[in-house]
Image (cartoon, rainbow, N blue to C red):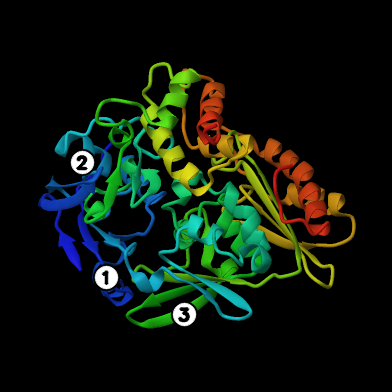
């Protein structure tokens, strides 16, 4: 049993994109804020803070979920993967990111980190999704710029085996 | 927004969680997947003293085949049940309803029991449990009791759970070979349903129909003979509450259209899907 009282802080340790990091958090601190403010990983964006918009989606132990609906203390010992992990150290985009660029799948880019993380999980489970399946996963995100068509095309391109 | 301060306790066993509930009663809230609870915390709709986190309790993270029933533990996520190999064969109605529950991303974290304990009147899993004639297992320091779905959910966000009780599992009767239908209407796939309809055809051809979003809890009854006429008369009886998405009259109209469609789906023995 682990107990943290209100207004007390506790040390939360987790693996962020392969690095073990820790910082202090109150029980009420959301994982999204912990990543951005305590760990300085601002690639994860925060939109609605009630699980609707999908901007803050990250992988926890490889599974896509809302970081705004997870408490930082709940991520203790977990492996958290964010958009910062996708590109190579020299800045080269990964195939999913490159497909987003090729297909104009973003304009302002605010929602993009969450969408990339959702499909990072989903394509690992289902490498050859139908358009309908892509749209179903995408329904967990809100994008106000693209009209979604470019995003669907990008995921289809990323899912295609390299020839 | 951010939640107001609360104490946080991560329970390692169901016994610990039950002991904490005995101590704090209705000043505590149980946190499993948090896909309904954390939004309510963030929006400051609720202000609990203490959160009891049961999400890491191994014992509660199990799907158990009890022969004539399937028991789903309180830490089992919706996507874990969706990925269970025997779901389509043993629980076809649940298999048809689950794709409508939230989104891929929220099903990864949201639990089956959490959705049923939250008791939103338009939500899919309480409807599926009610139409299936399933039950809810409650444990407290005083002992364990099992309630039928109809006795558990009483009204909007209101259940028969006492303040010191933990929902440890729900049980769905095995429905192998029974025709099922499920469909809902929502503004956007994955949003709260305006109305949701479920139907089951038993082997003796009796049809049980349930509708969510028309009253404070899922309404269930057996429909015989002319389905369209029976649904139409039933729609008149239901209060069909109003919100910004639909008037009561529109909800009744939707039910008149959707009800016979879902019944036909069940009669064909199909397991749901998009219409």
Numbered mark located on residue B143 in the image: none
Would you name the residue on which mark 2 appears? A34
The chain carrying label 1 is B
Would you name the residue on which mark 3 appears? B145
Question: Is residue B184 shown above or below B27?
Answer: above
Numbered mark located on residue B12 in the image: 1
* Number of dots carrying numbers: 3
CA separation in Å, label 1 and label 3: 22 Å
The chain carrying label 2 is A
Q: Give the camera-side residue of B247 and A120.
A: A120
Q: Position of residue A163 (x, y in %)?
A: 55, 32
Q: Quadrant of the N terminus of chain A?
A: bottom left
Does any portion of residue B165 appear in the rendered image? no
Q: Position of residue A52 (x, y in %)?
A: 43, 36
Q: Position of residue B128 (x, y in %)?
A: 62, 60
Question: Is residue A4 shown above or below A100?
Answer: below
């Amino acid at each position: 049993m682990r107990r943290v009282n209100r207004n007390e802080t506790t040390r939360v340790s987790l693996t962020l994109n392969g690095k073990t990091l820790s910082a202090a958090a109150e029980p009420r601190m959301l994982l999204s804020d912990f990543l951005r403010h305590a760990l300085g990983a601002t690639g994860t964006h925060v939109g609605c803070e009630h699980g609707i918009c999908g901007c803050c989606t990250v992988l926890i132990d490889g599974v896509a979920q809302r970081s705004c609906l997870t408490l930082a203390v709940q991520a203790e010992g977990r492996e958290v993967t964010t958009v910062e992990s996708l590109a190579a150290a020299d800045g080269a985009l990964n195939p999913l990111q490159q497909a987003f660029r090729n297909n104009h799948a973003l304009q302002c880019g605010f929602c993009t980190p969450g969408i990339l993380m959702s499909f990072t999980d989903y394509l690992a489970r289902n490498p050859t999704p139908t358009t309908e399946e892509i749209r179903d996963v995408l329904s967990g995100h809100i994008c106000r710029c693209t009209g979604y068509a470019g995003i669907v095309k990008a995921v289809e391109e990323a899912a295609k085996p390299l020839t | 927004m951010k939640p107001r301060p609360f104490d946080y306790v991560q329970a390692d066993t169901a016994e610990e969680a039950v002991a904490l509930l005995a101590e704090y009663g209705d000043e505590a809230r149980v946190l499993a997947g948090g896909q309904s609870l954390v939004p309510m915390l963030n929006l400051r709709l609720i202000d609990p003293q203490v959160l009891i986190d049961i999400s890491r309790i191994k014992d509660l993270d199990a799907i158990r085949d009890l022969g004539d029933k399937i028991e789903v533990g309180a830490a089992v996520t919706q996507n874990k049940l969706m990925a269970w190999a025997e779901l389509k064969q043993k629980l076809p109605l649940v298999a048809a309803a689950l794709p409508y529950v939230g989104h891929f991303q929220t099903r990864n974290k949201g639990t089956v029991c959490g959705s049923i304990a939250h008791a939103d009147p338009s939500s899919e899993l309480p409807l599926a449990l009610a139409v299936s004639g399933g039950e809810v297992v409650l444990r407290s320091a005083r002992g364990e009791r099992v309630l039928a779905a109809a006795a558990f959910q009483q009204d909007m966000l209101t259940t028969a759970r006492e303040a010191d009780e933990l929902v440890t599992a729900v049980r769905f009767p095995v429905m192998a070979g029974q025709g099922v239908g499920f469909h809902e209407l929502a503004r956007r796939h994955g949003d709260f349903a305006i109305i949701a309809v479920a139907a089951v055809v038993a082997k003796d051809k009796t049809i049980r129909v349930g509708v969510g979003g028309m009253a404070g809890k899922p309404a269930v009854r057996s429909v015989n003979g002319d389905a369209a006429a029976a649904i139409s008369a039933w729609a008149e009886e239901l209060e069909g509450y109003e919100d910004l998405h639909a008037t009561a009259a529109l909800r009744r109209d939707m039910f008149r259209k959707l009800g016979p469609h879902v019944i036909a789906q069940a009669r064909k023995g199909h397991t749901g899907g998009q219409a």
